Amino acid sequence: MHFQQFYLSCLAHASYLIADDGEGAVIDPQRDVDHYLEAATRLGITIRYVIETHLHADFVSGHRELAARTGAEIVFGARAGVEFPHRGVHEGDILQLGGLQLRPLETPGHTPESISWLVIEDGHPTKVLTGDTLFIGDVGRPDLAGGRGYTSDEMASMLYDSLHTKILTLPDDVEVWPAHGAGSACGRNISSDTSSTIGVQRRTNWALQPMSRQEFVTAMTTGLAEPPRYFPLDAEMNRRGPRPLRDLPARALSAEMLDPLALILDVRDADAFASRHVTGSINIGLDGSFASWAGTLLPFDTPIAVMAEDVAGASEAVLRLARVGIESVEGFITSCDGLPRSSIAQITARALRDTPQAVLDVRRRGEFDDGHVPGARNIPLDELADRLNEIDADQPLAVICAAGYRSSIACSILARAGFANVVNVQGGTEEWMRTA
């Protein structure tokens, strides 16, 4: 058997290639699929199946493109309701790969159609690919199916059954391979480990500890952060079937070619953006959690022009935007020449101690509660654009986050909205604590 995990750190997403006797399947593929094809070619594998554990909300899948380029059959849980040719499976069905069997377990709870896939070798279960049902150290959030007629409580109750009547009945030595790792918004406290075993999870995963159904439902539905805005859009794109990446070209633009209605997305780092940028542009740097913040903060229907250091950076940005369903990029620029330019003042955390002024902290509430600059006001970054009217536009304002990435994004949003007296705190609260 060949088994390989592909881990995309910027989306905390794990996908898999599994094969035996030259027959393979790819599970939960990311949108750009060349690396699966390259691995299959190198290993002499024919990809027979492209399998989805559920309708992913946090990224756009490459299932249709991979199937089109290999002739493979797309496989979903029968309840997914997808709008393109596929095989809908139920528990009891079997996919054969050489001497291996892949058996679906219907495990609703994160989504109604969620399927976990059991790998059977020589008649024995050896691995389970759990999608977003069971993570390492956590389980999938139950609040993403509201548009499909289920409440969060109902989904959490389904998840309780899926875990206790399906997943936890497996032997302790069965390996657990989920679709996401630490940092994914599909869970709350996922481990940085990318695999485990049923036995280890039975002992250490908080959500698998003894508790009643109602205790589990309450725990799963209390204190959930709002899901990122792009989640429903991506799930729908995956249900309908996204178009191939080759249909999303990006071209070099001159200043004269820029659409006057376009949003300029500057993907350079915070220092480069602060030094000089196109007036009114939004900074989301490629050096951080670019795709998830872009999906959370950017409109899906507005033309976008990418500002990057070079063509390679622009191409990377276009790809990462497509991974979260943003397909409105018109092209890219690599220079501010010929366009109105602005800058953002920066201040070190040490200097902030000596220069008292209003401080806006754009970290999440839990981060803020764990420690912050005295007197700082907290507006999380994902809420900032909707709460600008709560901030005095004439008051000098130092914007801070953990290390400077989110605060640069926030400064760009504020400047675009007409706030002229903002400074970005370099090093963020991490540096503030070190200089105490």
Image: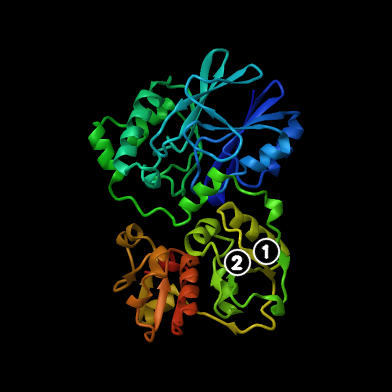
| Picture coordinates of residue 319, whole percent (x, y) | 64, 55
Q: Quadrant of residue 113?
A: top left
- Quarter placement of the N terminus: top right
Sort mark 1 into few (<14), some (14-19) or many (20+) by Cα contacts within 10 Å. many
User: Quick one: SS at disc 2?
Assistant: loop
Residue 367's label in the rendered image is: none
| Picture coordinates of residue 39, whole percent (x, y) | 71, 36
Return the residue nearer the eye: 154 or 26: 154
- Quarter placement of the C terminus: bottom left
Q: For residue 149, say whether it is visible.
A: yes
- Quick check: 127 above or below 382? above
Q: Which residue is mark 1?
A: 314
The amino acid on which the numbered mark 2 sits, given as a three-letter code, is Val
Q: Which residue is mark 2?
A: 267
- Quick check: 288 above or below 307? above
| Picture coordinates of residue 305, whole percent (x, y) | 63, 69
User: Quick one: SS at disc 1?
Assistant: helix
Asked if labels 1 and 2 touch by Cβ distance under 8 angstroms, the answer is yes
- Identified at 41% across, 36% down, the residue is 112
Left or right position of 232 against 47 = left
| Picture coordinates of residue 261, whole percent (x, y) | 59, 75
- Identified at 68% across, 51% down, the residue is 245
